[in-house]
Image (tube, rainbow, N blue to C red):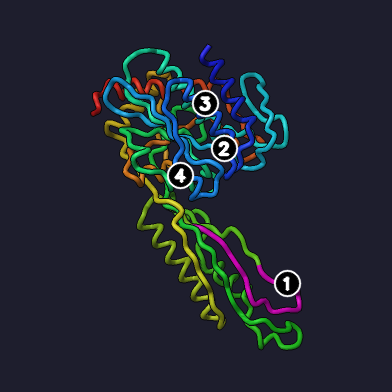
Amino acid sequence: MSDERLLSTFLDLVRIDSPSGSERVAAEYCRDALEAAGCRVWFDDAAEKTGSDVGNLIALLPGELPGTLALSAHLDVVEPCRGIEPVVTEGIVHSAGPTVLGADDRAGLAAAIEVVRRVAESGAPGPTLRIIFTVQEEVGLHGAKHLRPEDVACDLCLVLDADGAPGGIVVGAPTHYTFTARFLGRACHAGVAPEAGVSAITMAAHAIASMELGRLDERTTANVGSIRGGRATNVVTAQCDITGECRSLDSDRVEQVKADMDRAMRDAAERFGGQVELDWNLEYEGFVQPEEGREMSVVVSAMCDAGLAPWTYLTGGGSDANVLAAMGIPTLALACGMSGVHGTAEQIEVADLNALARVCVAAAVRLGESGVS
């Protein structure tokens, strides 16, 4: 019966339009469900700081045993996410139309809500449960970056927002930098007096050609994502903008790659007699969790209790787990069963959704048994 309720909650959530910045209706649905299960629920002030129409949702279900388990997921969904109609075919949920399904991260939301319901209904002593549902995760982890320490305090936080089959445990994610660069040259007629001009496109092209891009090693990547400039074939271009990024699980390595990319752009501007305006932004810090220790023991044991074979992996992507780990919260991200995320082929197996909820309930039991104080 509770598995059917979990699926129903998931289907309800995916039908709610919730692009980044417009999460209020989804947040209110979650608030009502969590309050009905016995939680105290509140919203923080992230709306004022991010521009969303609601803040991060925080909920607390007090427990009788020491320790606090936090479950985190995000409220927003990538476009196209308006008018999603989910279809269940042979145990697999997918979108009926030209939209994403929204399993990223409706799977996490629905599972967390169901965990609270099951723990409350069991009547068995357990640890305190904390729920953290953030806004604007998909556009830069903005909601998580404005969480207050007192709202996320816990002994273990499970971020329910990784693709792949349940059983997967993300133990590391990269530090991520992005940049915007504006190359400034001098315009002139390309046919009459090209020697009088300074081409911003030439500077940008030389800079990009000088960079090492793609997979630099097993833990490091770099990319130029966009280039824009020029207005006519007969004009030497005076301005060209490019954007890019670098990521690495090694904090020293990412700083080295960032410096190399920065130097390539500045050298190109100097070589051709122009200028470059550079803006670097630290999107999030990386983390690598030890594969031994109390937190991992709790989760691995919970996986086994739920009938899953646990496995660990490193990811090249970021999530709210990066922000929470940087705040000093013991954090692990769990695979939720979703696949094809951020595309119209996104899907999730109902059995995987059920497995995710079982793991989290088992984690609460294991944390309570560990005697954390």
Vertical placement of 361 versus 268: above or below?
above
Percent of width and height locating residue 273: 56, 83
Q: Which residues are magenta?
A: 229-245
Helix, strand or loop under label 4: loop
Task: Specify the amino acid type for callout 1.
Answer: Arg
* Amino acid type, callout 4: Asp
Residue 233 in the magenta stretch? The answer is yes
What residue does disc 2 label? 24
Question: Mark 1 sits on what residue?
Answer: 231
Q: Residue at x 44, y 17 (%)?
A: 118
Disc 3 target residue: 32
Distance from disc 3 to disc 2, alpha carbons, whole Å, reads: 12 Å
Horizontally, residue 9 falls left or right of residue 171, namely right
Query: Residue 141: percent from the left, percent from the top?
Result: 48, 46
Disc 4 versus disc 3: distance between alpha carbons? 19 Å
Q: Which mark is residue 145?
A: none
Q: Amino acid at mark 3?
A: Asp
Please, what secondary structure does the residue beneath circle 1 have? loop
